[in-house]
Structure formats: C-alpha cells, structure tokens
Image (cartoon, rainbow, N blue to C red):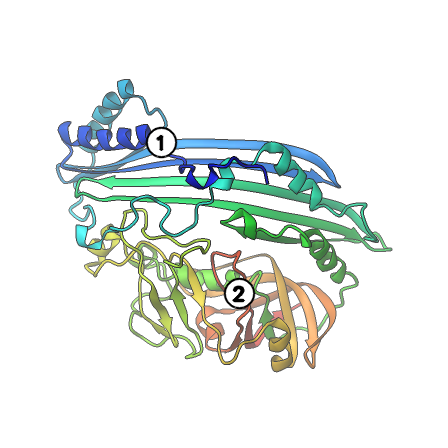
Amino acid sequence: MKMNKDIQTASPLLTAQETDFAQASLEQALRLGAQHARITLNKSRADLYGTLNGSLDKVTRNVDRAMTVSLFADGRFGSFSTNRLQEGQIRSFLEQSIAMVRMMAPDPCRSLPAPTRTEKQAQEGTELGLYDPACMQIDGDEKRETALGASVFGRFATEGLISEEGEYSDSVTDTLILDSNGLRCRHCETSFEYGVEATVQDTDGNRYSDYWWDAAPQRVDLVTDGCAEKAFRLAKAQQRPRRIASGKYNLVLDTECAGKLVSPVINALNGYAIQQKNSFLLDKLGEKVFSDKLVIIDAARQAGMSGSRLFDSEGVATQEGPVIDHGVIRKYFLNTYMAAKLQMTPTVEDITRPLLLPVGPAADRASILRETGEGVLVTGFNGGNSNAATGNFSFGVDGFYFRGGEILHPVREMLITGNFIDLWNHLLLAGSDIRRAQTRLIPTLAFEGVDFSA
C-alpha cells in the first residue's frame, strides 16, 4: 500500500475552516431571530473501481458537502440544506429560511434534545476507531490493482462462468453536529468494500447468479481474495433446481439474508410508526410478544466495528442494551419530537447496530441444519412485501431443500407467507455466525413450521 510516512497523523475530512464556518452559521442564525438552532455539517468522498470479466469497466468518484440547518423560531420549526458554504451567501440563506419557518404552523412538540441526553465524548470524531487515514493516501493505481487482482475470470477452471462483475470501493464520511444548547459532536468513518457477482450457465442455457462481498472500516481488514471464487461456487450451486410440494417446512435462514425478516420487527419499534399507528407492535412496550429465545440488543458503541455510532442525528448519545429481551419489548425508538407527540420518554431515533444473540451453544449454519433436521434453507429473497400494521408478510424465496442436515438440491421461486409475531414465536435456533462486515448482526436462524407454496 502506497502512503506517506505521516499517514498516522492525517486529518479527517472536514477542515478547521469548515467547522469554524458551521459554528459561525449557528451563531448567526440566533442573531437573525431563531430561538434555537442545530447545524449538521456533512462531508464525504467515495471512489469506486468496477471490473467486468477481468477488465477495468468503470471508475467513479463522488464528493459531497452539505450543511443542514434546523431552526426553531416563535414556536415553529423548519429544516433547510445548502451546499453553498460561502460567508457571502449564508446570511441570505439563513434570513430566507427563518422567514419560511415563521410561515409554518406552530408545533409545540418541536424542541432540541435536553443537554443531559446528548453525547459529550465524541469531540474529534475518531473515538470509535472507525477512521483509517489510509483512505486518503491510497492512490488510484493501487485501487485499480486491487479491483483487478480480485477477479478470477479466465484465471482458473471456472466452467460455466459467463460473467463476473466486481467492485472495489472506499469512502470516508465526516459529520459534525452543533446546537444552541452547547452540543458539539463529531463522527468520522471510513469504509473499504469489495463485492463480486458471478453468473453461470448450465448445459441447457439456464443462467444463475450470486454475490459475495467483504467490508471493513480499516483497509488492512478487508479481504478481497476468495470473494470471486465464492460467488462462482454459490452461483453454480443453484443449478438444476427441483420443485417441492407446498406445505409447512422448517425454515433455516442464511445470515446473508436474515435481515429481511428482522428489519420489519425493528421498523415496528420506530417512533414514527408507533405515532402513526402503523406498527404491529403498537402498545406492546413491556409486553412479552415473541418467543423467549429472541434476544436483540443494540451494540451501538463497539469500538472498531462497522456501524457503531456514539450519537444519532440529533446528537443524542446512543445507548447499548436490550431491545427485545427474551421476547419482551424493552424499547421504542423515540426521538425528541416523537416522544413529545406520544407523551413518552425519549430514547434515540433508531437502533444503531442490532445484534441478535445466539440461542444455546455456539453454532454455525452447518450445525443448525443438522439440529433442524429437515426443511428449506433460504439463501435469497426475490420480491414480496409485508404489512407494517398487521405484521402479515408474503415473500418470494430461493434456497435449498435439506434432510438429515444435508443439502439435497436447490429450490427456486417459492413463496413464504405468515405473520411476524407468529413466525418469531416459532424461533427454534439462532446461531453465532454473524459476520463483522455487517452492520446488522443477524446470525443464521431456524424457524419451525413456516408455510411454503410452490
């Protein structure tokens, strides 16, 4: 890796001039008539090198900088954004924004979070160890070589491989939040990613595709070797699918797609969904709703782990702890506004880094297949939807039929239907095979008696 000798002292993305500008804008908003204000300054840069069949196919760079101003004036609220960060233009922008706020309807529930709730430690933005200065030092030649070097197209025996699309990317984001109650917090994070999609064709001309990837906040932890080979093997494994009869089967859900059945549960805990009465977990706080095997915590503040954050978009300090504790709903995610609307105690605006804890001893997918015995291993979703208010769902799935813990053959284009509360009350097993690359840490899961239709 090419970098200069001062790499370890390289600065995050936002400059001192930009952070000073944000502070000056906050002070000016108050002078112009806002009683309170919040400034969010965000800057990002992302590079992508894409390959197609072993050759460089595309190179992109995206650079973005924007400042969002949330204004509280005369009992009214408005939020405005600009990317024109020049001293000669910001006064006019703020004057116009405040004038627009004063045309809004009064909203007594709008306020800044109490200073006792906001984050105090995140001053430099690098406290969680998620910023790697190497992101600013790696040159284009090395990025290109990384993308090309991970390709396997034409390099070894990949019978049936007809297409391979790979992407190496790296990015850095730097976010500063200030408010008129004295809040100052900053988060800086880098991400290095590589992913590849392989498409194969069988002797009958049928095509199958699959994908594999890796990601890490530190360049040294990114693993590109083996991604293309694994994507190729996953695609090959889908060939020659067979139909199985409709009916109830045990469902084993691969960790790579397990979030599909977890996200609706997390979303149902969101304050907006609760306030709009569009949640199947409405009025369930403190109640046992799911199997006592279901334990989800928010692992929000884990140093060095992708997705960790010390604060939310209001600057409120994140909190580690139980979200669903042995089936009991322990937390709704309520920002300051939604909490006031619902007359409830505010928490944070959303779950930061959900971690679904294992049930029983450590187990990977192979162990769970053996323990489950017979059913369908779902490795991908291909459409469908769910009803946020009732929890009913219908999803198209692909995967493999297994018996005696052994995968027998692929199955495609089946449909699973049910209700999330019933589904999670039939949780059999949760593994211990989460991937560090993921920000939603969901292991392999097994459920009993799920409705499948061909």
Q: Name the residue rendered at 46%, 60% in the picture.
A: 263
* Residue where numbered disc 1 is placed: 15
- Residue bearing mark 2: 434
Mark 1–mark 2 CB contact (< 8 Å) = no
| Residue 160 percent across, percent down from the top left | 82, 52
Q: Is residue 39 left or right of residue 161?
A: left
Q: Secondary structure at mark 2?
A: loop
**Residue at far front of view:** 5
User: Quadrant location of the C terminus?
Assistant: bottom right
Crowd band around label 1 with a 10 angstrom C-alpha radius: few (<14), some (14–19), many (20+)? few
Residue 394, image x, y percentages: 54, 63
Quadrant of the rendered structure where residue 371 is?
Answer: bottom right
**104 in relation to 425, above or below:** above
Q: Amino acid at mark 1?
A: Thr
User: In the depicted view, which residue is nearer to us: 252 or 353?
Assistant: 353
**Residue 188 placement (x, y as % from top left):** 39, 43
What amino acid type should be assigned to the residue bearing mark 2? Ile
Rounded to the nearest angstrom, the CA distance separating label 1 from label 2 is 37 Å
Instruction: Look at the numbered disc 1 and give the secondary structure of its residue.
Output: loop
Q: Tell me: 81 left or right of 240.
A: left
At x 37%, y 32%, the residue is: 66
The answer to whether residue 75 is above or below residue 397 is above
